[in-house]
Image (cartoon, grey):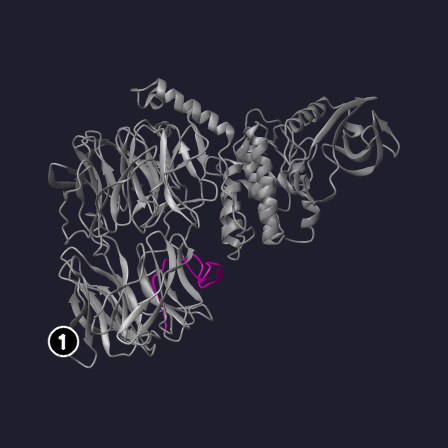
Amino acid sequence: MALTSGTKLGPYEIVSPLGAGGMGEVYRARDTRLDRTVAIKVLPSDLSSNSELKQRFEREARAISALQHPNICTLHDIGSQDGVDYLVMECLEGQTLAARLEKGPLPVDQVLKVGKEIAEALQKAHSQGIIHRDLKPANIMLTKSGAKLMDFGLAKPELAIPTGSKTPISSSMPTMNLASLTSVASPLTQKGSIVGTFQYLAPEVLQGAEADARSDIFSFGCVLYEMVTGRRAFEGKSQLGVLSAILEQEPQPIGIAQPMLERVTRECLIKDPAERFQSAHDVLLDLRWIAGASGAEEKAQPAKLKKSSLILLAVAALAAVLLAGLAGYWSKRGDTGSVIHAEIPAPEKYLFDATGDSGGMPVLSPQGDKIAFVAHSPEDKSLWVRSIAADGAQRLDGTQGAMHPFWSPDGQSIGFFAAGRLRKIAAIGGPVSVLAEAANPRGGTWGTNDVIVYAPDFQSALSKVSTQSDTSTPATVLDKQKHTTHRWPWFLPDGKHYLFLATSHLGGDPKQNGIYFASVDSTETHLVVSTDSAAQYASGYLLYRSNMALVAQPFDPATGKLSGSATPLINNVRFDDGVWRGIFSASQNGRMLYQPGNGAITGNRMVWLDRKGKELDAVNDRSYSTFDLRLSPDGKRVAYATGNGIWTTDLERKTRTRITFDSQPIVQPAWSPDGKELLFAIHVAQGGGNVEVRNIPSDGGGQERLLIPANNYRYPGWSPDGKYLTYLWGDGDSMISLWIVPVAGGKPVTVVQAPSSQSNVETYRVSPDSRWVAYVSDESGQGELYIASFPEGKGKWRVSANGGAYPAWSANGREVFYKDFNDEFYVCPVTPKGSEMEVGAPEHLFHATNQAVGVPFDVAADGKRLLVNLSEEETSAPLKFVSDWTAELKK
């Protein structure tokens, strides 16, 4: 029987009814002691004698009383009077999400706001072992202070499937009349069928499994889907139809307008709970990232590592100390229940710099007790160290511009690269020592004999150097007919043998590209396995990438031979195809660190940024790879290379046109002065000296024409006055210089000569009036930007202060833009004075992370906007820590 106005329940006076549902009737009431408005929830009178419902009611009370969170409805009191059991809760003013959805879908910013708030509420509940079990729009209240999650404590849903269904049946399920399943579907809980709303239940719950946090995540995915689309994820003409849809069908796509929300929702709604998001915190991090990327919030704040996880990690670290010398203890005992999975965020106000040629992939110490990583803020990019058992990280002074860190075998020191040099520092901080030159490095590894093997350049063999000297010697010999690079070395336990990746920028033979076995005592190597990314050895296994997954295969470090078969370990390790490595790190005692991501980072975004780095407009989505950007002379189109040739995009209409259709790799497009032709480099065969320079009409309607026969060319182009073809050339991979050849006919002439046999001109750009050339030379040990006269090549004025690459001129020739090796963008004022050039002080513009390979940007004619190529993923995602990955192999 309904309660009337004025009825007293203890100190609470009923004011008016608020609503009713399957778990009780709700009234507005006044707390006469504190003179405040509250909500009172009682069991319906016709169900008050049902002992099962009363147990649920009490369970709900206990659950809510343990939760204190701004996005969870607060429980004030619990009582019983005259056979009426009741809860006293805060009175929420607003409307339910279900009522709001009757008007249609929510705007994206509101979806993200509500989604984040509910994810935070679930994270809090799950951290205390509480599962909601009935998450749905009707149990979410939208208030002025934010979304509030209501109605915890429902029992495990149970449902029997009719005879003839393809769905497995739990032997403990009660039977049910078929008519109840074929009646019109309703969003309300029905007595005698299931506890929890039918349309939002996870498949495993419908099949009789115990609900857990992942079941709530599935329900949360249904709610997200409904907020975005205005329709339920799973629908049918009857409950049986809805059940079949949940178990066997996928929801209709959200649509290309919301690709990021589409991905998050889809991963919440995966049928198999093991493949679904594993925690509400995972979902929350993705929603924060989307909100930050879409501008829905000013900046996504890095998540904090939960205290409970820190305690567990501290215990794990202590156990490792007590069990010193027993590496692999957890995996040997086979107790997978002890495996810890945790998340480690970047330092506050910083982002992980995990990818790209200047990135710093986080690496575990060999003992698995510390992490070294590179992180950046708008003002800084440095090396950091964090103890697994500590709440916080230490920034190491003197490591600005750090990239590609690696540990000493004892875990006391860290090797890294910065400003074109290989360096080392104590893990606790201190003075930095310089060991060797490394202009454009691709990783290093530190052996037990204090020898470091490293890749000094992105197109080179490996070198080695003792940590006690500064004299380096060759470690491997590069066979240019097979490979263009050796990189990402990894020492094996004996400190003598090591692994490395050998591959080709030109594609090469897939059977010859892969992980090689080598020794510091010899230049002989042999292929271990064909793959497209770096590998690591740990705990008796070779860890490498195969078919988009991180796999583990038994490996003998003494002979360099594999045995057995490869076992998939993690399906979603982030892969940086720009430098050919997965973002993961393994210690020698079963611990692993990785950054999640959906396959390879293959998509890029071309975006217009102003001089402060604010995004003004996007030219393309993230659906394809682009590199080597070049704006047309009139600024209306952009040419770029992809994996299948040269394309152009009309910047006003944002339509793409494919220009070339060759099967060979094609790179570095450049416009003719009138914009009617495109010139480009095409790799016609393997090895050095096999690049042709060709041109083609820029509308895509003509045939290619050979301009310069095959040789070792880079970055071909026209001078803006149309008088010269320009290009970089060298006899091999050293002494690359800037050359020109008159269009009207004549012999090639050197404009800027590499000053030594070990130096190169790396990139260049001729000024709009064709009187000057800005170029990058690594003669000082790292790339720096200079200006010389053109075409004479006289004079030499340094522009960059601490590294520079990829120069671009403003249309008036009074500013030169460039980026350094820490992804910082600069502009420098320049003033021609006769045959001299006056160079001003470089001005820092902004930091833009994750540029794609090749020429990463160009500048609009007015110098007020930069077209920048950004890679697919932001680096704010936390790191995933696994205490014993070898236990995962036994599952």
**In front here: 795 or 110?**
795
Q: Is residue 483 magenta?
A: no
Residue 2 in the image, given as x and y percentages of width and height: 84, 33
**In front here: 99 or 463?**
463
Residue 117 in the image, given as x and y percentages of width and height: 60, 41
Residue 841 in the image, given as x and y percentages of width and height: 36, 61
Check the picture and name the quadrant holding the N terminus: top right
In this view of the protein, can residue 51 be seen by the observer?
yes
Q: Is residue 666 left or right of residue 199?
A: left
Q: Is residue 29 left or right of residue 52?
A: right
The residue carrying mark 1 is 747
Residue drawn at (33%, 45%), measured in percent from left and top? 402
In this view of the protein, can residue 660 be seen by the observer?
no
Where, by quadrant of the figure, is residue 546 drawn? Answer: top left
Q: Amino acid at mark 1?
A: Lys
Question: Dot 1, how many residues are within 10 Å of its Cα: few (below 14), some (14-19), or many (20+)?
Answer: few
**In front here: 809 or 56?**
809
- Above or below — where is 68 with respect to 760? above
- Above or below — where is 211 with respect to 118? above
Magenta stretch bounds: 605-632
Quick one: SS at disc 1? loop
**In front here: 664 or 248?**
664
Q: Is residue 621 magenta?
A: yes
Residue drawn at (41%, 33%), measured in percent from left and top? 881
